[in-house]
Image (cartoon, coloured by chain):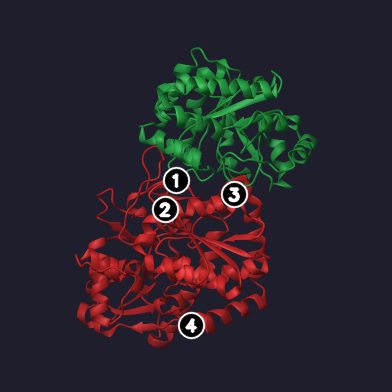
C-alpha cells in the first residue's frame, strides 16, 4: 500500500500546497514542519517552473520569487532529504513536465523515491501522455497522481480506473486561485469516480475558507488548498510558519 | 505514444481541463477538412477576401546585384492584413464557426496574428480577445490600435518576459477558464495536437502555390525554398509541398538576436534542447533545470523560445536546415530589399532575406531560390528607425 493512503486514514484529509523556495528554502523547511504539526495529512510541494501555465497569479508570483531566490531541483531534493529525518507526513511534488523531463525522468523519479517523496502531480501530463512517466513511477514506487476536471465527462471512468495514490478533482474551470464560489457539481463527479474506483478523491482549485473545505469534503475525501496559503507566505515572508500553521489547523478542524 | 507526433516531437501536454476541447477540435477538423462545402467556402475567403493566390515575384535586381542564383519572392506580404497569418486564421475561424463557437481568443507577438484574428472575427461576427506581451504592445503599437479598431479586446500580458511566450501561456490559461463558446485560434504550428497539423494544413497553400507558379515560370522545381522561423508557420507552409521533393533544399532562418553565442538569442534549433512546453515536445531554449529561457530578438514575431514539432522532426531527420540570423543582419536585409526591390519586408521575413543574400552568391546562376516574404514591414519602420538611432515614434 502506498504511503499516500495514510493521508486518508485520519478522517477527511487536509492537503496544503506551498512552492519550495518561496521566499527561501529555510522558510520552506519551517513551513513544512508547521503544517505537519498542525494536522496536514499530506503536503504538496511545488517545484517552481518559469512558465506555470496551470497557475493563477498568486502561484505564478510565488514561482518567480522562488526562482529569483536561486531555487533549483537539486536544492529541493536536498531539502526533502533533510526534512525526512523527522517529518513522516506523506509528501508529493507538484511541478511541470519539463522540470522532470529535463532532469531525466528516471533520474528525477528515482531521486524522489530516494529522498522520500510519495507522489508526483504533473498538471500538463494528461492521461494520453502519462505512458512516458507512469511506468518509471511504478518502478520506483512513486504514485503519479491523475487529475479529473469539470470538463472530463466520459474520460472520468478511464482515468479513475488507472489512478494511483489519490485522485485530484479539479473543482472549477480555469487556473489555480481563490474563488468566492465553486459551482461545479462535485458530488456528481465523485459518484462517477466511485462507480469505477475506490481511490481517495481530493478536491482542489479555488478553496480558501473552512466553510468551502467542509462543503467540498461532504462528498470528497480531502481538500487541497494552495493559493490561500501562498498568499499568507507572500504577506508574512520568513515569518509565515506561525500564521500558516494556524491556518492549516483551522482548515483541518473544519474538515475532520 | 500519444496522438499527433512528428517523430518524437509533438503530443498533447496540456491540463486535463482542455483535453476534451482538443479532442472535439480534432474530430471537427477531421470532418471538415474533407468537406466540399467547407473547402469551397475557405477557398472563396482565400481568393476574394485575402487576395490569394499571392504573387511569386522574380526579384531581378536583387538577383543581378547578388550575382548568383535566381531569386523569387513569395509575396505573402501582399495578403489582406499584410502577412501569411490570415491563411491560418480564416481556416480556424471558419472551423470554429462550424463548431458553434462565438468567441476567438489568440496570442500575438508582432501583432500580425492578432490583427488577422481580429479581422476574421469582425468578418464572421465573432467576439475576439487577443493576448499580447506588454513589451510587444510597445514595440508594435500600431497593431494594437488596429486590433482595437477591428473590435477586438487587447490584453497586455505583464508576466515573465512580457513577450510572445507569456502571451501564449496567458491565452492557454484563458482557454481553460472558458471553453464552451471559445476557440483558441493558435497562430503558429505549435502547441498541443491537433494545432501543429491544422495550422500547417491551412498554411500549406503557400507551397502549393509556389510549386504551381514556379513550374509555370521555370518549368522545374526550385533548388532552395526558405523562410523565417519563430514557431514556424510560414516556414512549414513554404516547405510542406516540397518535403517529398528531396532535391529541394528547405531552409528555416531563426532569430539569433545579438548572436547564438550570447544569451540574447531566440535561435531554438541552434541553441535549444529537447523539452516539453506549451503543450508539445520539441526543442526549447532552456537552462539545465528545464526553466524556459528569456529569449530575445529584435523581431517580436520570432521572439519565442520554442519551435513547432514538425520543424524539430525535419531537423532530426536532416530534411530541413536551420540557420541563425542576427538582428544586425536582419536589419541590413530589411533596408536592402527596400532599396533594391522597393519592397519593405517585415523584420521577421528579413531574417530569411538576409540568408538569401548570403546563399545566392555561392550558387550558380542556373539555380533557383524561393524566399517567402511572410509579411510587410510597415509595422517595423519606427522600431528599425530607432535601431538606427533615429528618434521616430508612431
Which of the pair A127/B266 is nearer the observer? B266
| N-term-proximal mark, 4 vs 1 | 4
**Distance between mark 4 and mark 1 Cα atoms:** 38 Å
Residue B132 lies, in percent from the top left, at 44, 58
**Distance between mark 3 and mark 1 Cα atoms:** 16 Å
Looking at the rendered structure, whether the residues under marks 2 and 4 are on a common chain is answered as: yes
**Disc 3 chain ID:** B
Q: Which numbered marker is on residue B51?
A: 4
**Disc 1 chain ID:** B
Which residue is the site of mark 2? B306
Which of the pair B56/B364 is nearer the observer? B56
* Residues at discs 3 and 4 in contact (Cβ within 8 Å): no
| N-term-proximal mark, 3 vs 1 | 3
Q: Quadrant of the C terminus of chain B?
A: bottom left
Residue B253 lies, in percent from the top left, at 34, 63
Colour of the chain lettered A = green
**Other residues around mark 1 within 10 Å, as few (<14) / some (14–19) / many (≥20):** many
**Disc 4 chain ID:** B
* Residues at discs 2 and 4 in contact (Cβ within 8 Å): no
Task: Tell me the SS state at disc 1.
Answer: strand
A135 sits to left or right of B308: right
* Residues at discs 2 and 1 in contact (Cβ within 8 Å): yes
B306 sits to left or right of A138: left
Chain depicted in red: B
Which residue is the site of mark 1? B275
Q: Which numbered marker is on residue B2?
A: 3
**Distance between mark 3 and mark 2 Cα atoms:** 20 Å
**Distance between mark 2 and mark 1 Cα atoms:** 9 Å
Amino acid at each position: 500500500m502506498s504511503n499516500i493512503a495514510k493521508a486518508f486514514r485520519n478522517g477527511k484529509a487536509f492537503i496544503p500546497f506551498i512552492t519550495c523556495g518561496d521566499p527561501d528554502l529555510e522558510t520552506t523547511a519551517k513551513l513544512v514542519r508547521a503544517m505537519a504539526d498542525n494536522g496536514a495529512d499530506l503536503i504538496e510541494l511545488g517545484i517552481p517552473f518559469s512558465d506555470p501555465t496551470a497557475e493563477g497569479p498568486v502561484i505564478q508570483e510565488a514561482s518567480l520569487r522562488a526562482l529569483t531566490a536561486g531555487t533549483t531541483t537539486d536544492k529541493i531534493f536536498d531539502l526533502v532529504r533533510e526534512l525526512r529525518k523527522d517529518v513522516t507526513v506523506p509528501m508529493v511534488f507538484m511541478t511541470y513536465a519539463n522540470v522532470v523531463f529535463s532532469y531525466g525522468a528516471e533520474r528525477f523519479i528515482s531521486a524522489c523515491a530516494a529522498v522520500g517523496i510519495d507522489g508526483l502531480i504533473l498538471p500538463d501530463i494528461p492521461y494520453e501522455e502519462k505512458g512516458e512517466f507512469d511506468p518509471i513511477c511504478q518502478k520506483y514506487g512513486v504514485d503519479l497522481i491523475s487529475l479529473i476536471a469539470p470538463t472530463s465527462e466520459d474520460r472520468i471512468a478511464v482515468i479513475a480506473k488507472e489512478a494511483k495514490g489519490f485522485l485530484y478533482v479539479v473543482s472549477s474551470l480555469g487556473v489555480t486561485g481563490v474563488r468566492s464560489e465553486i459551482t461545479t457539481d462535485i458530488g456528481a463527479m465523485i459518484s462517477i469516480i466511485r462507480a469505477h474506483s475506490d481511490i481517495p478523491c481530493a478536491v482542489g482549485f479555488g478553496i480558501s475558507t473552512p466553510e468551502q473545505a467542509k462543503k467540498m469534503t461532504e462528498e470528497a475525501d480531502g481538500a487541497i488548498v494552495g493559493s490561500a496559503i501562498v498568499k499568507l507566505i507572500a504577506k508574512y515572508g520568513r515569518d509565515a510558519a506561525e500564521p500558516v500553521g494556524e491556518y492549516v489547523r483551522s482548515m483541518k478542524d473544519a474538515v475532520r | 505514444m500519444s496522438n499527433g507526433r512528428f517523430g518524437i516531437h509533438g503530443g498533447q501536454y496540456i491540463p486535463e481541463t482542455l483535453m476534451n476541447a482538443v479532442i472535439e477540435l480534432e474530430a471537427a477538423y477531421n470532418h471538415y477538412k474533407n468537406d466540399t462545402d467547407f473547402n469551397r467556402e475557405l477557398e472563396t475567403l482565400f481568393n476574394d477576401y485575402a487576395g490569394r493566390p499571392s504573387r511569386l515575384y522574380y526579384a531581378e535586381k536583387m538577383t543581378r546585384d547578388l550575382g548568383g542564383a535566381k531569386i523569387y519572392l513569395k509575396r505573402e506580404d501582399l495578403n489582406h492584413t499584410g502577412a501569411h497569418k490570415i491563411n491560418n486564421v480564416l481556416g480556424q475561424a471558419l472551423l470554429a464557426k462550424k463548431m458553434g463557437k462565438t468567441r476567438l481568443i489568440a496570442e500575438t507577438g508582432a501583432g500580425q496574428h492578432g490583427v488577422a484574428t481580429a479581422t476574421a472575427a469582425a468578418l464572421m461576427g465573432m467576439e475576439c480577445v487577443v493576448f499580447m506581451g506588454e513589451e510587444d504592445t510597445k514595440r508594435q503599437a500600431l497593431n494594437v490600435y488596429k486590433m482595437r479598431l477591428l473590435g477586438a479586446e487587447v490584453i497586455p500580458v505583464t508576466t515573465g518576459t512580457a513577450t510572445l511566450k507569456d502571451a501564449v501561456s496567458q491565452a492557454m490559461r484563458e482557454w481553460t477558464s472558458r471553453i464552451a463558446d471559445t476557440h483558441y485560434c493558435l497562430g503558429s504550428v505549435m502547441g498541443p495536437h491537433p494545432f501543429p497539423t491544422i495550422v500547417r494544413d491551412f498554411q500549406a497553400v503557400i507551397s502549393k502555390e509556389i510549386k504551381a507558379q514556379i513550374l509555370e515560370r521555370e518549368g522545374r522545381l526550385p533548388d532552395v525554398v526558405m523562410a523565417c522561423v519563430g514557431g514556424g508557420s510560414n516556414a512549414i507552409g513554404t516547405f510542406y509541398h516540397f518535403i517529398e521533393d528531396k532535391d529541394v533544399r528547405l531552409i528555416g532562418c531563426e532569430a539569433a538576436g545579438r548572436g547564438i553565442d550570447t544569451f540574447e538569442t531566440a535561435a531554438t534549433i541552434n541553441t535549444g534542447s529537447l523539452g516539453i512546453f506549451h503543450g508539445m515536445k520539441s526543442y526549447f531554449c532552456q537552462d539545465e533545470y528545464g526553466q524556459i529561457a528569456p529569449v530575445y530578438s529584435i523581431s517580436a514575431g520570432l521572439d519565442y523560445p520554442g519551435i513547432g514539432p514538425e520543424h524539430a522532426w525535419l531537423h532530426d531527420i536532416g530534411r530541413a536546415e536551420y540557420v541563425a540570423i542576427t538582428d544586425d543582419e536582419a536589419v541590413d536585409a530589411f533596408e536592402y530589399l527596400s532599396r533594391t526591390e522597393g519592397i519593405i519586408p517585415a523584420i521577421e521575413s528579413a531574417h530569411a532575406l538576409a540568408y538569401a543574400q548570403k546563399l545566392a552568391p555561392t550558387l550558380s546562376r542556373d539555380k533557383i531560390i524561393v524566399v517567402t516574404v511572410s509579411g510587410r514591414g510597415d509595422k517595423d519602420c519606427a522600431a528599425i528607425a530607432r535601431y538606427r538611432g533615429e528618434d521616430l515614434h508612431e
